[in-house]
Image (cartoon, rainbow, N blue to C red):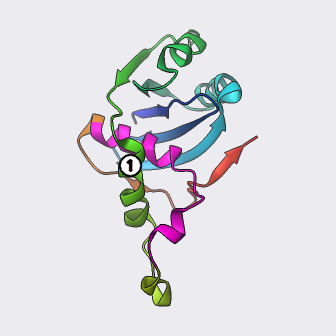
């Protein structure tokens, strides 16, 4: 089992995905305040056998890499251009609109959503060149405070 963490770095918050590559499955997708990211990753690598961390090359990439100095395995920087824009479309693939909601403009459903975790998923999918499915318990709107 090859588990990886993917991070969409940001100044105030980061998207984080924990996935199993061989199963093509996402087990955790959260948005975490940037100052809490280091502790959260520490807890994950203690609980899970993480083979690598993939970090988007955008905002605060260098600072995030420095915070994860304790991770002794591979840390990869990967292109994240347009992931936030693409996350809006991916959101509707993951959470399709059903019933009468289909008649409303799609933007209404993501107006106040934080798409950082979906951006982290897109970074992972681009890196692996394949789509991932969600474990049933995954909620992309989860915030760690």
Q: Which residues are magenta?
A: 105-126
Q: Nearer the viewer, residue 137 or 142?
A: 142
Q: Residue at x 47, y 89 (%)?
A: 99
Q: Position of residue 44 (x, y in %)?
A: 61, 31
Q: How many marks?
A: 1
Q: Would you place residue 8 above or below residue 59 in this image?
A: below
Q: Position of residue 133 (x, y in %)?
A: 39, 56
Residue most toward the right? 145
Question: Would residue 23 be seen by someone viewing this image from the given angle?
Answer: yes
Q: Quadrant of residue 2?
A: top left
Residue at image mark 1: 85
Where does the N terminus fall, quadrant-wise? top left
Magenta stretch holds residue 124:
yes
Q: Nearer the viewer, residue 53 or 12?
A: 12
Indicate left or right for 5 with 39 as reference: left
Question: Would residue 21 be seen by someone viewing this image from the given angle?
Answer: no
Q: Position of residue 108 (x, y in %)?
A: 52, 71
Indicate left or right for 44 with 130 as reference: right
Main SS type for the magenta part? helix
Q: Residue at x 59, y 45 (%)?
A: 30
Q: Quadrant of residue 94?
A: bottom left
Magenta stretch holds residue 112:
yes
Indicate left or right for 113 with 76 as reference: right
Label 1 Cα crowd, 10 Å radius (few <14 / some 14-19 / many 20+):
few
Give SS at disc 1.
Answer: helix
Q: Would you place residue 106 above or below residue 84 in this image?
A: below
Residue most toward the bottom? 100
Q: Would you place residue 60 above or below residue 19 in this image?
A: above
Q: Quadrant of residue 35?
A: top right
Q: Residue at x 65, y 37 (%)?
A: 32
């Amino acid at each position: 089992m090859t588990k990886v963490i993917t991070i969409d770095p940001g100044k105030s918050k980061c998207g984080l995905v924990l996935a199993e590559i061989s199963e093509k499955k996402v087990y955790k997708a959260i948005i975490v305040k940037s100052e809490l990211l280091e502790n959260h990753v520490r807890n994950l690598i203690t609980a899970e056998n993480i083979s690598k961390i993939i970090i988007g090359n955008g905002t605060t990439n260098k600072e995030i890499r420095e915070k994860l100095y304790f991770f002794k395995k591979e840390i990869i920087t990967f292109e994240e251009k347009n992931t936030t824009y693409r996350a809006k479309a991916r959101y509707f693939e993951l959470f399709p609109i059903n019933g009468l909601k289909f008649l409303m403009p799609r933007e209404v459903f993501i107006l106040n959503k934080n798409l950082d975790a979906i951006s982290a998923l897109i970074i992972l999918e681009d890196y692996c060149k394949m789509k991932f499915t969600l474990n049933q318990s995954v909620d992309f709107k989860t915030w760690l405070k």
